[in-house]
Amino acid sequence: MRKYIITSLFLMLLAGSVLLFALPGDRESILSENREPKEMPAVSAAAIFDGSFESDFDEYVNDNTAFRSKLMRIYDIIHVRRGFTPEDSGRIISTTTDIGTGEAQESRLVLYKGRIMEMFTSSPENETNYAETLNTIRKNIDDNIEMYSMLIPTQLEFCDAAVSNVQDSEKEAIEFINSKLSDNIKTVDVYSRVQEAWQSDSYLYYWTDHHWNMNGAYCGYEAFADAAGFVPKTRDKYTYNETGSFYGSWYQKAKSELSPNQPKDICFYYDTSEKGNIKIKMRAEDAVTEYGEGSPVFHTDVIGYGVFFGGDNPLMEIINTSNPDGETLMIVKDSYANAFIPWLINDFARVIVIDPRSFEGSYLDEIERYSVTKVLFENYILSTTYSDYWGMLGSRLE
């Protein structure tokens, strides 16, 4: 009799699982995490043998299950009643990350008091190669053009020592890279600015996303102004706006380990384009999109980090019609720059933004095309750990 009961329960669970997957997926729960549901992964022998198909298929099933939000809420309640309280103490989970280069690598996240933070592992070899990449670029750029290097620390570096000590020192890695740079590359000390601001405002980075927000990016703006020799404009000069709340890029990877009261992030910005004096042109290969006066620096229909310019683009030309006689700055960047660039647009005649992950042209051609006077290489410290990223940086000279 007992075996029939067990068999019946198993069949009921199996039928229930099939039904949950057969019914329409809970799309709204995915959209609430500021992303699209995972697509069915392509089947290939390579993907099966390296394990990526299994991982991708698991994510596809999770994203396309009916009543997903309710099931995950039940799981969260059970998890908390088992005594897990991540907001009170640090917890480390393993995951994989990809900064948009196509190279996924193993990484670890620290969950602490509602924050989800990426751990940094120092690699002197990678850090040296990153510095040498910038030195090679410097040799190919005209000596009259000023070149800057800006490395951005993450928030884990500034948390309580008991938590921040689980990772390698980002400060030491930044100083090591700076020591390897040519004398004619000026370094931007973002670290000190963030460290100082952290004492009075710890909401400089998103809680559930690996990026800094526009308050954190203001620290970078002040630091670059120090290095480049201009006076930064104050935040109170611009109107503060909020467009909603959201869960960021780390939320899905850590959700099963979070408590039900995990705080959402605030999507906000300071409207540095409110005078309508900004024009934007975007170029991808030979296609040019021109938005004209009042271009959308801030995409208010996006709730999340994509509020800044709608996300990453191969090349943007940002024109300040109020400052036609100003200098032209080129920024070669990772996605951390997206929240940083809006602070700069009123200090230059033009800001040229290049993302080496999708840009396929030559820095030298663009420097000549736009009569660039300053070039800034801006990246967060973990970008230096991706060999294919600094490889892309160095390949855009020809």
Image (cartoon, grey):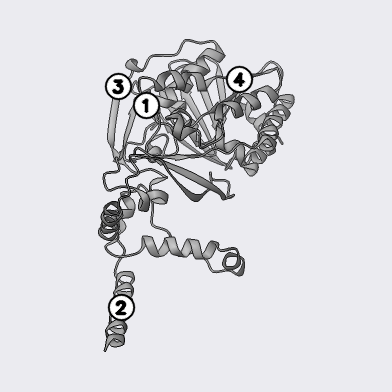
Q: Is residue 130 left or right of residue 209?
A: right
Asked if residue 355 shows in the view, the reply is no
Residue hosting label 2: 15
Q: Residues within 10 Å of mark 2 (few under 14, many from 20)?
A: few
Residue hosting label 4: 187
Q: Position of residue 315 (x, y in %)?
A: 54, 35
Q: CA distance from mark 3 to mark 1?
A: 21 Å
Q: Secondary structure at mark 1?
A: loop
Choose top left, top right, bottom left or bottom right for residue 180: top right
Q: Amino acid at mark 3?
A: Thr
Sooner in the amino-acid sequence: mark 3 or mark 1: 1
Where residue 303 is drawn, which disc sits there?
none
Q: CA distance from mark 3 to mark 4?
A: 31 Å
Sooner in the amino-acid sequence: mark 3 or mark 2: 2
Residue hosting label 1: 202
Q: CA distance from mark 1 to mark 4?
A: 24 Å
Q: Nearer the viewer, residue 295 or 392?
A: 392
Q: Residue at x 30, y 47 (%)?
A: 259
Residue hosting label 3: 239
Sooner in the amino-acid sequence: mark 4 or mark 2: 2
